[in-house]
Amino acid sequence: PDLLLSLISLASTPLPMLALFHDALHSADALDESDLFLWEQEPPYAYPEPIMTVHEVQYTKNMVDIMFGQHWRLSK
């Protein structure tokens, strides 16, 4: 039972937002494998979240505004 809980806990830990995963998502050929040695360490992986671009910040703000507007309309 302890192993099962450990596996569930490990499987539910989010992966860091690294270019490695984004590159692999788009194309296996575009994958830069030069940083793979970092993954030989034990989790959790201490990598900072990437800095959001101006467009991502605006998109997030728009989505928050939409959600608050929807919540307000439903509460009337």
Image (cartoon, rainbow, N blue to C red):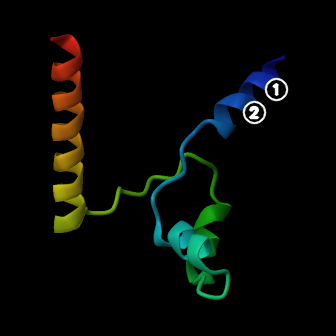
Give the residue type at disc 2. Leu
Foreground pick, 69 / 19 = 69
State the separation of the CA atoms marked 1 and 2: 6 Å
3 left or right of 37 in image: right
What residue would you read off at disc 1? 3
| 3 is higher (above) or lower (below) than 44 | above
Q: Which residue is mark 2?
A: 7
Residue drawn at the location 54% of the way across and 51% of the way down: 15
Q: Label 1: few (<14), some or many (≥20) within 10 Å? A: few
Q: In which quadrant of the rendered image does the C terminus lie?
A: top left
- Residue 19, horizontal then vertical, whole percent: 47, 72
Which image quadrant is residue 25 in? bottom right
Q: Is residue 11 above or below residue 8?
A: below
Q: Position of residue 51 (x, y in %)?
A: 26, 63
Report how many numbered discs are placed on residues in the image: 2
Amino acid at circle 1: Leu
Q: Position of residue 35 (x, y in %)?
A: 56, 76
